[in-house]
Structure formats: C-alpha cells, structure tokens
Amino acid sequence: MTKLKENRVPLSNANLLFIIAAVILLVMYLFAIALFPESFTQPQTFFDLFNNNAALIILACGMSVVMIGGGIDISVGGVCGLVTMSCAVFLQSAGADVGRSVLLALAIGLAFGALQGFLIAYLEIQPFIITLAGMFLANGVMTIVNSTPIRVELPAFVALFETKLKIAWLGTVNRHGMFIPCKISISMLIAVGVIVAVALLLKWSRFGRNLYAVGGNAQSALMLGINVKRTRFLSYLLCGLLSGIAGYAFLLTTAAGNVGNASGFEMKAIAASIIGGTMLTGGVGNILGSPIGALSLLTINEIIRAAGIDSNIQTIISGFLLCFFIVLQSVIIWLRDRSGGFKLQRPPWLKASLRTRDGEAP
C-alpha cells in the first residue's frame, strides 16, 4: 500500500486548473437552475449557449494555443469581424457560392496568422504590439469592405443557416403538451469539431509537445533541439486559421455582416482561456478548458439576463471571476513549486493513472 502511494502520479497544473474551472461551471449552472428552474432546466437553454456563441468558443481555443506557447493575440476579434463582413459581402455579389466563401474566410485568417506569426517569431517583435496593430488593421479593412449592415440572402447559404439537427429523444414539453426536440446548429457542430481537432493536435502531435515546451521555457526547448521560432509561427498561424473559422461560424449564427461584428471578442477569448486554466505565462493549459471558460462567462450573462439586472453587472462579475482565476493560478503554482509543498494526487479509483516500479498495473 505504501509502495502504491509513492508511485501515484500527481495531477498536472493544467489538469488541476481545468478541474477547478469545470467544478465552478457546474456549481454556477446548478445555482442558475435553482434560481430560474423554468429556463435552465430546459436542455435547449444549454445547447443555445453553444448555438449562439460558437464563434467565441472557437476564438478561445485559438487564444489558448498562442497563450500555451507564451504569446498573446488580441487581433482575433477584429479578424473574426473582418471575415464575417467580407464573406457576407461576397455572398451577396454576383456568382458567389458557399464553397468559395469558406475558402475566403480561411484565406483571411491564414493571412493574418502568417503575417503576425512571422513578425513575432522570426523578427522577435513583441506579440502585444503586433497583434494590436493587426486588430486595428482588421477593423479598418472591415469598414472599407462595407460600413453598413448587410444581410445574406443567397438561397444556398440561407438553407445552410436554417439547417438544424434535431435530437429526437431530448427536449421539453410546452404548455400545450407538445414535445419540442432540442436543436443543434451547424455553427455548434463546427465549434465541437474544432475543440476535438485542436485537443488531439496538442495532445498527440509533435507540434503540441513542442508548444508546451516553448511556452514553459524557450531556452530549455532550444537546447533540446526544438525549433522555437517555427513553433511560435505555427501557433499564430493556427490561431489565425481558427479566427477565420470563427468568423464564418459567426456568419452562420447571424446570417449578416455588421461593423460591430465580434466587438470585444478578443477580451472575452482571453478571459475564457484564463478561466479555463490556461496561464498567461505559458506552458500550462488544457484546450478543453477554453469552452469551459467561455461557458462560465456565458452562464453569468444568462443568469443576469434572466434576473433582469443591469448588464453592467455582468462586466463587474466577469472581471471579478477573471481576477479570481488569475490569483488562484498564481497561488496554486507557488504552492506546488515550494519545496515540500502540497501535491494533489489522483484518487485511487483512477487506476489508469497509477504506475508501479515494476511497470505492472496496480
């Protein structure tokens, strides 16, 4: 028994912070159910958090990628808005089709990601300065593309926009006794696909391992033979690609382009990443925590809306929650790095996480 205890693998900082974020989200949602059971007990309410905010969740994933690598990207909201407006204008032009609009979205995202990644990784310019310039550039170009709201009326796109997948066995019964199944939008499916793809990429690919190493200590990573500049470049390229995907997901949510598209999304994406367990110092983060952080912020918004409270309170509570997680991260890392400090370990029932000295399963 003593031998077994000595060989338990402690939870990593990333997984510990992810578990804390997940528990807080669960507590918040249960609190919402207790306060407003008529609204939050309906499964569709939870699905709508994804349906209506798929773009923010995708942006949070992209932000987590660059933050794990030790960087930051505050241009994601501007790029997302530019993609939405550009694709909306393109889809209203003569001879447009949905397939080419998707390629346009990806091209814009990749262009920003490649340009900013090159300047940051290879010319070693501060990420904040470059991405701030990228945000201004994207917002400026967006007003040049079109300065007035525009709604997409292309039949093929409208059909895609109105497509909803129904979950026949899950739903609610309305006051007339009619069963209404839950509906999932295309944008939600895109967000889920992005989460799974990025999580697998960071978990199983060489790029993912290199990214954590570079974010943890760039000098040590360089001594281990890791191409630090290429890794940083690829992280911004991936973030740009996800910004393009988020912009198109936002268009699928609203079916319109507006100069106010994705306004403030960059700050919300940073907040969601931090709340989900990604550290600003780099090297620590769980990509699955990004949607958890985003859902936490969105749940706060829904609670305030249901309570009829001034929307400014949402900003105050979001700021408090963000500060709490930043302090929590610092305290946890400080305590775990202390000599003889506490080490939270996986419980015995997680047998897969236990190792013995002779290599046999416990």
Image (cartoon, rainbow, N blue to C red):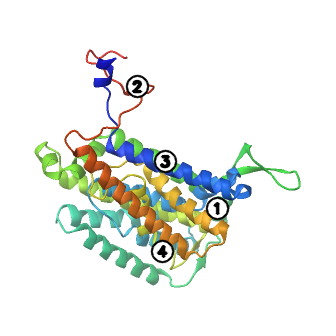
Residue at image location 36% in from the left, 54% down from the top? 328
Quarter where residue 269 is shown: bottom left
Q: Residue 352: which numbered mark, if any? A: 2
Distance in Å between CA atoms under marks 4 and 1: 22 Å
Give the residue displayed 23% in from the left and 45% down from the top.
Answer: 337
Q: How far apart, in angstroms, are the residues tagged by discs 3 and 4?
A: 27 Å
Q: Nearer the viewer, mark 3 or mark 4?
A: 3
Residue at numbered disc 3: 22
Which label is found at residue 263?
Answer: 4
Q: Is the C-beta separation of discs 3 and 2 under 8 Å?
A: no
Quarter of the image with the C terminus is top left
Mark 2 vs mark 1: give the one in front: 2
The reply to whether dot 4 and dot 2 touch (C-beta < 8 Å) is no
Q: Is residue 341 above or below residue 265?
A: above
Residue 345 in the image: x percent, y percent?
35, 34
User: Label for residue 161?
Assistant: 1
Q: CA distance from mark 2 to mark 1?
A: 43 Å
Give the residue type at disc 4.
Answer: Ser
Q: Quadrant of residue 354?
A: top left
| Foreground pick, 104 / 8 | 8
Q: Nearer the viewer, mark 3 or mark 2?
A: 3
Q: Give the amino acid type for the residue marked by disc 1 in the picture.
A: Phe
